[in-house]
Amino acid sequence: MPKGLILAIRKKYEENIKKGAPWIPVTEIIGNSALETAVSGELGKILSLSGKFLATGYYNQKSYIACRILSRDPNEKIDASFFCRRIAAALEKREKLFPGGYYRLIHSEADGLPGLILDRFGGTLICQISTAGMERLKPQLLATLGKTLAPETIIFRNDVPARLKEGLKNYVSVAKGEAQGFTKIHENGCVYFADLLRGQKTGWFYDQRENRKFIADLAEGKSVLDCYCYNGGFGILAANHGAKSVTFIDSSARALELAALAAKENSLLESCEFIRAKAFDALEKLQKAGRKFDIVLLDPPAFVKTRADKKSGMMGYERLMKLGISLIAPSGILALTSCSHHAPRGELKKLLENCLKKSEREFQLLKSAGAAPDHPKHPLLPESDYLKFFAFRVE
Ligand code: SAH
């Protein structure tokens, strides 16, 4: 029998593990006295009821997802070399997709490293650990990052709500080098800026890279509204592709400051207008003023943060969509995105289409998309399809 923590799995869940399920809910683990004294995040062997090895994972009795799988190879040790192999495999895929060092390098389960997000900004790495198991493996992770990627700066943005459910404290720390006030990002041929220490999530949303390009490719000579613009991801690229004007709206002064800096850096300031306001207030004002835009892009923070918010969150999307429709010029493009795990793609699409039907304007769905491929989806985790992007032509 293997040494260390043993997790015996109920018979009916064995098949799921064999098919590639990356998690084991607490209800599928057969209780034993060793589990009571296990340390949060401890590594364990997952065995079938008959004692056959299934996988190695880490265990946390504080979480409903009691175990997350790291390896299915009985001989694979979870050490710095393990991290080296996983990171090298991810690196090869990313450099093929987006050569140049600006991308999400590790997307948790989908890259075989549950509980870890790693975003790369040239020589700066942002790590985000969301589980106790990954937190315990931080020394091995750090040893690997230094060797495989030789970054100048490593920052831990361990300030996500998921950590609290794991019994972890939130913190932000600089593990190597010095954090800058803002960092330059290269994406789609544009330069942007992000405050990696204090910005949203890991500081930048690489997941919208291809959706930004889609909008920008339609933007030449058009007036564009980039609502919930953050540091200018969509609008700066649209301006760079020849948009006649871009109106940026965000409630964050820092986000607008960095969007304006990007406009200046790309010599686009003349075509850009910045409005600091709550989105609904700003959109209503524009509506009252009779403003119309050829392209309206609405990229709000998650409105449905938990299952309990679903009704009010979906109503939020409906209200936002209606305002968006009222601002669309004839034959314009209206795009709305949602990063709410709890707003299913099909339901959201239906809601948006119903709003368009009610407006009695003809429309077509031009594109229904998700996150860029440096955010791969795990085939057995529907929640990894979190980003929804819908673009409509509205006559
Ligand atoms: N479109 C951006 C990402 C948007 S993230 C990109 O391509 O990178 C969501 C943004 O919404 C954040 O910048 C946040 O500051 C802003 N925000 C949150 N609540 C808001 C509100 N009520 N009104 C306006 N902006 C808001």
Image (tube, rainbow, N blue to C red):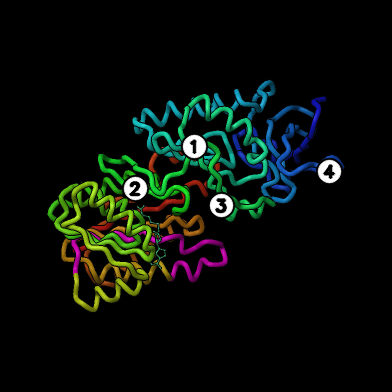
Which residue is farthest bottom? 288
Q: Who's the residue at 56% across and 45% down the image?
A: 173
Which is in the foreground here, disc 1 or disc 4? Answer: 1
The number of numbered discs placed on residues in the rendered structure image is: 4
- The quarter of the rendered structure image containing the C terminus is bottom left
Compare residues 253 and 219 and report the one nearer the observer.
253
Above/below status of 207 relative to 5: below
Q: In terms of sequence position, does the residue under pointer 1 or pointer 3 come before the other?
A: 3
Q: Which mark is residue 177?
A: 1
Q: Who's the residue at 63% across and 45% down the image?
A: 131
Location of residue 291 (image quadrant): bottom left
| Residue 366 pos. (x, y %) | 26, 52
| Residue 95 pos. (x, y %) | 38, 29
Q: Which residue is mark 4?
A: 37
| Residue 246 pos. (x, y %) | 21, 59
Few, some or many residues within 10 Å of mark 4 (<14, 14–19, 20+): few
Q: Who's the residue at 44% across and 47% down the image?
A: 196
The answer to whether mark 1 and mark 4 are in CB contact below 8 A is no
The answer to whether mark 2 and mark 3 are in CB contact below 8 A is no
Going by the numbered disc 4, the residue's amino acid type is Thr
Q: In terms of sequence position, does the residue under pointer 1 or pointer 2 come before the other?
A: 1
Few, some or many residues within 10 Å of mark 1 (<14, 14–19, 20+): few
Q: In terms of sequence position, does the residue under pointer 1 or pointer 4 come before the other?
A: 4
In three-dimensional space, the C-alpha distance between marks 4 and 3, rounded to whole angstroms, equals 27 Å
